[in-house]
Image (cartoon, rainbow, N blue to C red):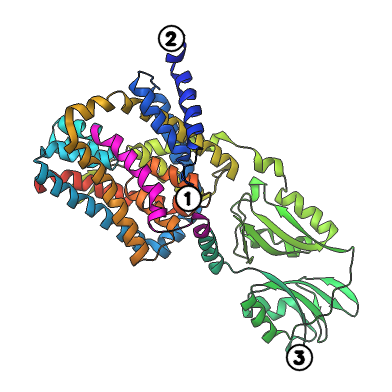
Amino acid sequence: MLDFFSHGYIALFIIIAFGMIIGRIKIFGFSFDISAVIFVALFLGHYGMVVPDDFMKLGLLLFIFTIGIQAGPGFFEAFQKYGRALIVTTLLALSSAVIVLIILTKTFHLDHNLAIGIFNGALTSTPGLAAAIESTNSPLATVGYGIAYTFGVIGVILSINILPIIFKVKIKNEEIDYQNNIKKDNPELFSQNLIIENPNLNNKKISELKIKKMADVVLAKVLHEGNVLPVKKDTILFTGDLIKVTGSKTAIDQAKIVIGKNSDKKFPPTKEIVTEWILITNKAIVNKKYSQLDLSTNHNVTILKIKRSGIEITPKSSSIFKFGDCIQITGGKPGITATKKILGNDTKKLSHTDFLPIALGIILGVLLGNINIPIGGFIINLGMTGGILASGIFLSRLGKTGSVIWSMSGPANQLLRELGLLLFMASVGTKAGVTFIETIKIYGFELIFSSIIIAIVPIISGAAIGKLVFKMNFLTLLGVVTGAMTSTPGLAVVNSKSDCNAAPIAYATVYPVALVFIIIISQLLPKIL
C-alpha cells in the first residue's frame, strides 16, 4: 500500500487535494487558498513523499507562459504610463534587501559565499544563484540558496496574505478602482439622437463632412422625412433630420456643437435596419485594420462599438481586429448577415483551446532564455523563467503569425495557469520538505532568521513606497513586489485573490528589471561583503 502512494503522480494529487481542502478553511476570514498546497507538500515531503522535478518544470513553464499571455496586451501601455513608478519601487525594494543582507552578514558573522546564496534563495532567484556560483566558485552559495529558498517562499506567501490587513485594504475595492482607471482612458460609450441644425451640413454627403474628425463619434443612422436611412458615404443630410450618434459624453458634447441639439424624438421601428453584436473569430482578419475591410462601403454596415476585455472602445479606421473582440454593428439585414460570415461570430472557436501556440511559445521562450546578453561587462541571460515570460508578452502583443493566434480564452488561461502552479508548488514543496527539519537543526536560528528577514523586508518596504509615495493601486503594488522578488508562488497568491490583470501586468513589467538587478548584485556582492 505504501508503494502505491510512493508513485510521483499519486503523491502529486494527494498533495493537491489536501492542499486545496486546507486552503479553503477560513479562520477569522483569513485563508491560504491555493498557497496551502506548498505547506502540505513541505509536511509530506519531510515524511518521504516525493513529486518528481519534471512536474515542477512543466508547472513553471505553463504558469509563467500563461502569465505572459495574460499580461502582454496591457504590458507596454502600463510601462509607458506607470513605468517610472514601478521600476523605482522595484529597485528601492531590492536595495533594501541588499542593505539588510549586509547588516545581517556583519551581525551574525556569516560566511560571505553563504550569505550570497541566502540572498538569492530568499528572493527565489535561480538565475541569481547561477551568477552567485560563477562569482564565488563556492558550494556554500548553493547551500545558502537551499536553506533560504523554502523560507523565502513561505515569507512571501505569508506577507502577501498579511499586507492587505496591515494597509487596511479590501481587494474587491482595489479591483473596482483599477477598472475605473482603465475606463478613464476608455470612457463609457453612449448613444444620443441629435437634430441637424447646422446649415453647413444641409444637402451634403456624409463623405464630404468629416464629422468624425471634428467630434470623435460614430454616426449610426439617419431619420429623413419619416424614413430610417443607413449611414453610408453617399447618404445626404438635411437640416431638420434626426441623426443617432455613439461616443463618450465628451465626444457627444462636441458633436452637438457641430450638428445640433439633443432630441427626445425616437426612431420609428424598422425591420430594414438592425443592430447586433458580432464576435471576431475569423483568424484571417485578425490584425487587419478596420479600413482594410471597409465594411461601410462594401456591406452598408457601421461599426458602433468595440468591446475588448469588458471595456467599450470607440472604433476608428485604424482600429485593428483582435481575436475574441465583440463589435456592435448596425445596418441592413443582408449586410449584417454578410458581415457575420466575414468576422466569424463562432462562439465554439472562442472556447476552443489551441495547444500549438502554447507549445511553440514555450519552445521559443526556452531558446530565448538561453541567449547570453553582455551588459556593462556582465553576461546576462534571462533563464528559462525570464525567457518564457518574455515570449508570452511579445507573442500576445503580436497577436497573430500566419494562421497561429497568440492568445487564449480567459477560462483556458486560468485553468492552465492554476494547473501549472499546482504542479510547481507540489514539487518544490516536497523537495524542500526532505531537508526542512534537518536544515533547521544544522544551521540554526541565525540562518533561518536571515532568510525570513531578507524575504520579508523588500516586500514591506516596496509596499510602503508604492502605497504611500506613488499611491499605487494595491493589486498593481502586489504585482510589483512579487515581480521584484521574482516570486512565482507570490504572484500565485495574488492571483488567487483576484482575477483582474493588475498584478500580472505589474509583475511582467518589473520582472526583467529585477532579474538583471539581482544577477548584477550577485556578481558584485563578493566585493561588497
> What is the secondary structure assignment of the residue under circle 2?
helix
* Residue designated by label 2: 3
> What is the secondary structure assignment of the residue under circle 3?
helix
Task: For the residues labelled 2 and 1, say whether their Cβ atoms are less than 8 Å apart.
Answer: no
Q: Can the viewer see residue 88? A: yes
Camera-side residue of 44 and 304: 44
Camera-side mark, 3 or 1: 1
Q: Which residue is drawn at 52% across and 60% down?
A: 173
Q: Which residue lies furthest to the bottom in this view?
A: 199
Rendered view: 82 above or below 457:
below
Rendered view: 161 above or below 425:
below
Q: Earlier in the sequence, mark 2 or mark 1?
A: 2
Camera-side mark, 2 or 1: 2
Kind of residue at disc 3: Pro
* Residue designated by label 1: 71
Camera-side residue of 448 and 219: 448
Whole-percent x, y for residue 445 in the image: 18, 36
Q: Distance between the residues labelled 2 and 1?
A: 42 Å
Q: Main secondary structure of the magenta part?
A: helix
> What is the secondary structure assignment of the residue under circle 1?
helix
* Residue designated by label 3: 199
Q: Residue furthest front?
A: 28
Packing grade of label 2 (10 A; few <14, some 14-19, many >=20) is few
- Residue 174 highlighted magenta (yes or no): yes
Q: Which residue is drawn at 55% across and 45% down?
A: 407
Please report the bounds of the magenta region as a residue range: 147-175
Kind of residue at disc 1: Ala
- Residue 402's disc is none
Q: Residue at x 59, y 64 (%)?
A: 318
Camera-side residue of 112 and 245: 112
